[in-house]
Image: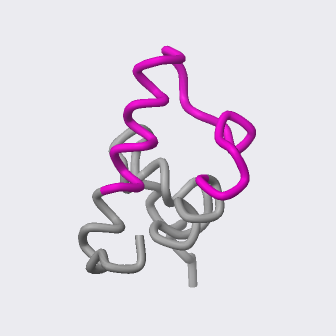
Amino acid sequence: MSGMSGEEKRSWAIAQLREKYSQLGRLPKKEDFDQPTHSRIKAYLGPWPRALEAAGLKPVRQPKSRRS
């Protein structure tokens, strides 16, 4: 993994999530991965909900509008 660029790491993490989604037929959970894989996915894509969004498995959360 150390020889990979940032974009390659991001692509790898997205592929891991999408593959697990295909295998399970549901959104993958952190517990569906071994600890090293889970840690890398979070390092490359951010917190779990954002990682699922980056992989296109979950709609991107819109920031809540603030009322004045």
Q: Nearer the viewer, residue 60 or 52?
A: 52
Residue 68: say if magenta. Answer: no
Q: How many marks?
A: 0
Left/right placement of residue 36 relative to residue 11 reads right
Q: Residue at x 42, y 51 (%)?
A: 53
Magenta stretch, residue numbers: 12-37
Instruction: Tell whether 15 sits left or right of 40.
Output: left
Q: Quadrant of residue 66?
A: bottom right
Q: Main secondary structure of the magenta part?
A: helix
Q: Is residue 25 above or below residue 3?
A: above
**Percent from the top left, x then y, of residue 3?**
32, 79
Whole-percent x and y of residue 25? 49, 14
What is the basis of the colouring in this image? one colour
Return the x and y of residue 39 as percentages of the image width and height: 64, 63
Which residue is at a point 57% across and 85% down the rendered structure image? Answer: 68
**Quarter of the image where one finds residue 16:** top left
Q: Residue visible at 34% across and 65% down?
A: 10
Q: Quadrant of the N terminus?
A: bottom left
Q: Quadrant of residue 2?
A: bottom left
Left or right relative to 33: residue 40? left
Q: Nearer the viewer, residue 63 or 22?
A: 22
Residue that protrudes farthest toward the bottom in the picture:
68
Between 21 and 60, the residue placed more toward the observer is 21
Looking at the image, residue 8 lies above or below residue 13: below
In this view, 31 is above or below 60: above
The reply to whether the magenta stretch includes residue 23 is: yes
